[in-house]
Image (cartoon, grey):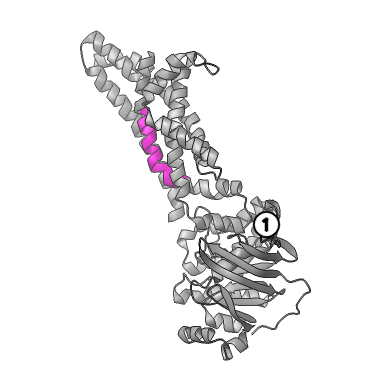
Amino acid sequence: MDYIFSILGPLITGTGVTLKMFLVTIVLAVPLGLALALARISHWPLLSGLVNAYIWLMRGTPLMLQMLFIYFALPFVPVVGIRLPDFPAAVVAFVLNYAAYFAEIFRAGIQSIDRGQYEGAKVLGLTYAQTMRRIVLPQMVRRILPPVSNETITLVKDTSLIYVLAMNDLLRAARGIVQRDFTTTPFIVAAAFYLAMTLVLTWGFQYLEKRYDVHDQ
Amino acid sequence: MINNPPMMNKPMIKAEGLHKRFGHNEVLKGVSLEMGKGEVIAVIGPSGSGKSTFLRCLNHLETINSGRIEIEGEVLASTDTAGHCQYAPDADVRRICRKMGMVFQHFNLFPHLTVLQNIIEAPITVKGVKREEIVPVAEELLRKVGLLAKRDSYPARLSGGQKQRVAIARALAMEPDIMLFDEPTSALDPELTGEVLRSMRQLAEEHMTMLVVTHEMGFAREVAQRVIFMDHGEIVEERPAAEFFASPAHPRSRAFLDNML
């Protein structure tokens, strides 16, 4: 027990890095994903096609490769080439990647809304933008909660990929102690930390689902 | 039957030679209609006759391939001599179509909003009416359709007949000059159609201009002044309701009525 307390310090610091990565990614990737979803269903074929290609690229290559590319290769790309420090580089990769997945979830949610809702809004005089904001998106939220919950929990664990940029997230902190002390206990403690984080998320999403359920009662 | 109010000079709806194709399937083959203020017209006919499509073309839920539509003298769509169909600019289309309220077969209430919120949504969002001004109006409309007690319920809690009456109140809250009904009772259990028809009859008694696509022959006979019988994308017969039901002239209308009654 004393041993566990003695290693909590670095693990909590690592959890801080993990949570920071997680929160910044969520806050940026959700709105970007929504924008991509709306562009993807737009009737302007060029825009929709570009977003389609973007989603293919982001889902079709490993997140780790994208992160390594932005950190190591981007500085050498002509014109757009900039050198990002490790945390911003990781954030850019995570946001661009997760936004693509969120975009597909949002698109599925939007397209699951009955045509009658659009027609009902149209005959009342609502514009397309008003229909989206007031009628379609609020209904979409309820339907996408389960897949978004999935994606969010995956993100918590995916943040451990940032070890390749030598950032001390929870898992890397644990591994450091394992290699120093020749015991696997830090892994078990780290697992408990991950489980605690995903439990909070699970409860959060269950609460949201229940709150949105009032419409169906 | 309700007395025919005097016809105004300017027709409320004037449709000329509407053509509509879905792919190679021509569903409207030159449908024309002129409708006066306060008139109640029932559009009847077998399914697939194009009657719903005709209604949906009038308020731009479908676009026509050729023809001309005027609402209260304003041109919604017109076709030039070369056969090019041209719609008014988007903002005008929206403004013109707002003169028409519509009630759908499947209600299309917004499930995430309460009954009251369903009714006040468009007046607030579209017209910019203040909430405290529109709420009493909405409550009065709900009282009229007998649903004031359901003010704060969500649509999922309502029966089909109640949903449709809310849908009528919602359309009326935008103060339309014309009401379009697209088979308003077709999705309802038979014992629930009466309450919806009662609300519609009340509306007709207040001289609302109403164009009603329906399978309710009783309603068509008692409330409508004119009946339009459509089949295969054309108006086959168009006559005062009493005459039509007493002695349908066309063999196809006669066959249809024999099947219905």
Q: Can residue B233 be seen from the camera position used here?
A: yes
Q: Residue A215: within the magenta?
A: no
Q: Where is residue A120 shown, x and y percent of the image?
A: 56, 58
Q: Where is residue B84 shown, x and y percent of the image?
A: 66, 58
> In terms of depth relative to the viewer, which is nearer, A49 or B220?
A49
Residue at 62% x, 89% y: name it: B243
Q: Is B179 on the left-hand or right-hand side of A93? A: right
Which quadrant, please, contains the C terminus of chain A? bottom left
> In terms of depth relative to the viewer, which is nearer, B125 or A192?
B125
Residue at 35% x, 17% y: name it: A163
Q: Can residue B129 be seen from the camera position used here?
A: no
Q: Which residues are magenta?
A: A141-156
Q: Main secondary structure of the magenta part?
A: helix
Residue at 32% x, 27% y: name it: A194
Q: Where is residue A153 shown, x and y percent of the image?
A: 36, 33
Q: Amino acid at mark 1?
A: Tyr
Q: Quadrant of residue B7?
A: bottom right
B43 up-or-down from A164: above or below: below
Mark 1: give few (<14), some (14-19) or many (20+) Cα within 10 Å.
Answer: some
